[in-house]
Structure formats: structure tokens, C-alpha cells
Amino acid sequence: MAKRYDGMANDKDDLTIGPVRRFARCPKCNELIDAASTSCRYCGSPLTAQELERAAALQTKLTEAKSKANNRAAMVAAIKSLVVVVLIYSLWFLLRFFRGYGRAPRSR
Ligand SMILES: [Zn+2]
């Protein structure tokens, strides 16, 4: 019974998000590999810590740029849908308003 699950009290590692796993592009075959590894698991070429550090830094920058772009895209999409909702609502409101106005008895 080695795999007893202790729940929240003892297993802090299960709850907290550990250090983010970094990825790096292999300088030889350009595959995405774990930055903590010492050799590429695709082409098997040994990797120096320096190479990996540089590749990982580049990859982190790329990932950050991508997620930033994604955030911006998501925000633009959110604003667009908000604008669409507002437009539809105001159209509906105007339609109601003008219909009500047309039906209203004119008193002069
Ligand atoms: Zn490789």
C-alpha cells in the first residue's frame, strides 16, 4: 500500500504548482525538449547546460510573446462580442421605441 493518498494535509506538493517546466529547442534537430535534460530525446545529441539555458530562455521569451498575443486576441474578441451585444441590444431597443412611437396615438 505504498500509494496511499494523504489528502490535503500532508501532500503539499500535490496542491502547489511547482516551478514551471521549461522547454527548449534542440539546437541540432529543433525539437521541443525538456530544458532539464542533458541530451535531446529526439536526436540523442548531448547538450551543454549553456546551450540549453540559451535555448530555454529563447523558448520562454517566445512562449511569453505568444501568450501575450493570445491575451490581446482574447481581449479583442471579448470587446468585439461586447460591441455586438450592445449593438443588438440598442437595435432591439430602437425597434421597440419606434414601433411604440408609431402605434402611439397622435394628439395635436
Ligand atoms: Zn535534437
Image (tube, grey):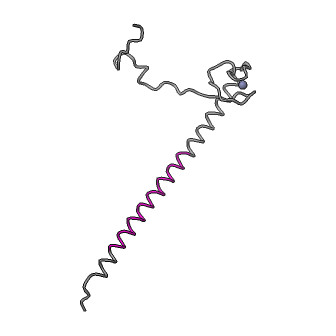
Instruction: Name which residue lies at 35% across and 20% down.
Output: 8
Residue 48, quarter of the rendered image: top right
Q: Bounds of the magenta span?
A: 70-96
How many numbered marks appear?
Answer: 0
> Given the current orientation, which residue lies at the most extreme top position?
1
Q: Seen in the image, is 48 located left or right of residue 104?
A: right
Is-magenta flag for residue 39? no
Residue 22, quarter of the rendered image: top right
Instruction: Name which residue lies at 62% across and 28% down.
Output: 23
Residue 18, percent from left and from top: 48, 24
From this view, report whether residue 2 is shown above or below residue 34: above
Q: Nearer the viewer, residue 55 or 7?
A: 7
> Given the current orientation, which residue lies at the most extreme bottom position?
108
Ligand 1 in which quarter? top right
From this view, report whether residue 21 is shown above or below residue 71: above
Instruction: Name which residue lies at 38% across and 12% down.
Output: 4
Residue 41, quarter of the rendered image: top right
Q: Seen in the image, is 66 located left or right of residue 102?
A: right
Dominant secondary structure, magenta: helix
Residue 6, percent from left and from top: 36, 15
Residue 65, percent from left and from top: 60, 41
Instruction: Name which residue lies at 64% across and 31% down.
Output: 57
Q: Seen in the image, is 58 located left or right of residue 89?
A: right
Q: Seen in the image, is 85 located left or right of residue 60?
A: left
Residue 99, percent from left and from top: 32, 77
Is-magenta flag for residue 85? yes
Image quarter where the N terminus lies is: top left
Image quarter where the C terminus lies is: bottom left
From this view, report whether residue 72 is shown above or below residue 52: below
